[in-house]
């Protein structure tokens, strides 16, 4: 209780604590981003083998905890001192301590991004339960963004618990009232579901995946149906700008799929912090 009172009395200390904690969680998010798709793929392989009556395919069992992290180039097991968030990457200059193979810059970027986002969340919402909820939402959106960029999939293991967590959170400490959260979850799913089927019936192609429906439903559950128009508008504009830029600059084909989840996640973060004033301004323009 004394610690909580001290943190409450010193906002700067609370912001610093949230930023430091965000960096630590960012290190765990790197594990989730790397391993969760591999865990899903392994599970699919086992299910397919079982349905065909075959022996399980060879391969190492993998979870978020095991095996220990190691260099993908030489197999060197990463020790504790080599796995300190941000610091180890900087000390090692972005290379494996054993074979000097390059380590992706995304690892420290995820850790730093998580830390900065959590520090700003503490500054924006203050010492309140909404800060904890906002940080949880941001962590999930960060993990989903990276996984979708890598594998073009938004795992149900994250999107569905995130949806239910938003509804439960708004019972006790609200970003919105529970009725708006429920309507937001339903409307978020149905809006993209209708767009999906309209596009498919018109063109015969799939314009997005079901994970996008679930992610927008989760954002609606956390922030309410009122932010959905803003979220859809911002994500669509961002996706269009990035897509056109990729086509023009990198000569990327128009038929090459572009994941939509990162744009939904980015729009969700904007809606989290500035959704209400932006929505009021938008309505005022109309």
Image (cartoon, rainbow, N blue to C red):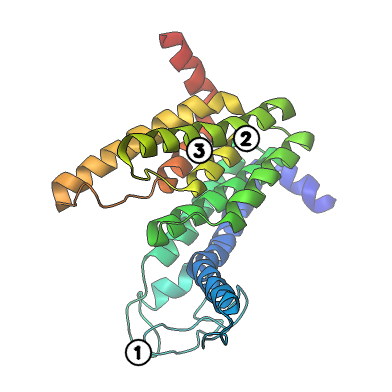
Residue picked out by circle 1? 99
Residue picked out by circle 2? 185
Residues packed near mark 1 inside 10 Å, few (<14), some (14 to 19) or many (20 plus): few
Q: Is residue 47 above or below residue 256?
A: below
Cα separation between marks 1 and 2: 48 Å
> For residue 99, which quarter of the picture?
bottom left
Regarding mark 1 in the picture, which secondary structure is present there? loop
Q: Mark 2 vs mark 3: give the one in front.
A: 2
Regarding mark 2 in the picture, which secondary structure is present there? helix
Q: Is residue 259 at least partly visible in the picture?
A: yes
Report the front residue among 252 and 204: 204
**Residue 5: percent from left, percent from top:** 80, 45
Q: If you read the primary sequence from the N terminus, does the residue marked by circle 1 or circle 2 appear first?
A: 1
**Residue 259: percent from left, percent from top:** 38, 50
Instruction: Check the picture and name the quadrant holding the C terminus.
Output: top left
Q: Is residue 110 above or below residue 238?
A: below
Q: Is residue 177 above or below residue 85?
A: above
Q: Mark 1 vs mark 3: give the one in front.
A: 3
Residue picked out by circle 3? 268
Report the front residue among 7 and 200: 200
Q: If you read the primary sequence from the N terminus, does the residue marked by circle 2 or circle 3 appear first?
A: 2
Cα separation between marks 2 and 3: 13 Å
Cα separation between marks 1 and 3: 40 Å
Regarding mark 3 in the picture, which secondary structure is present there? helix
Q: Residue at x 51, y 31 (%)?
A: 191
User: Farthest residue toward the front?
Assistant: 52
């Amino acid at each position: 209780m004394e610690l909580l009172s001290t943190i409450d009395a010193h906002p700067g200390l609370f912001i610093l604590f949230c930023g430091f904690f965000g960096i630590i969680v960012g290190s765990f998010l790197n594990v989730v981003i790397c391993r969760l798709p591999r865990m899903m793929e392994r599970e699919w392989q086992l299910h397919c083998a079982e349905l065909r009556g075959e022996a399980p395919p060879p391969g190492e069992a993998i979870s978020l905890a095991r095996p220990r992290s190691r260099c993908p180039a030489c197999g060197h097991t990463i020790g504790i001192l080599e796995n300190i968030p941000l610091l180890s990457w900087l000390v090692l200059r972005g290379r494996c301590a054993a074979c000097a193979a390059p380590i992706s810059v995304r690892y420290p970027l995820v850790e730093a991004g998580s830390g900065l986002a959590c520090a700003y969340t503490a500054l924006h919402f203050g010492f309140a339960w909404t800060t904890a909820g906002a940080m949880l939402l941001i962590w999930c959106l960060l993990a989903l963004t990276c996984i979708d960029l890598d594998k073009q999939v938004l795992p149900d293991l994250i999107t569905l618990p995130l949806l239910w967590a938003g509804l439960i959170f708004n019972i006790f400490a609200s970003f919105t009232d529970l009725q708006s959260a429920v309507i937001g979850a339903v409307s978020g799913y149905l809006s993209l579901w209708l767009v999906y089927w309209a596009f498919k019936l018109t063109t015969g192609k799939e314009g997005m995946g079901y994970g996008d429906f679930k992610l927008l439903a989760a954002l609606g559950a956390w922030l309410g149906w009122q932010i959905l128009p803003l979220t859809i508008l911002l994500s669509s504009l961002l996706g269009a700008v990035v897509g056109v830029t990729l086509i023009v600059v990198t000569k990327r084909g128009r038929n090459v799929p572009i994941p939509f989840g990162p744009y939904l996640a980015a729009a969700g973060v904007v809606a989290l912090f500035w959704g209400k004033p932006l929505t009021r301004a938008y309505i005022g323009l109309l």
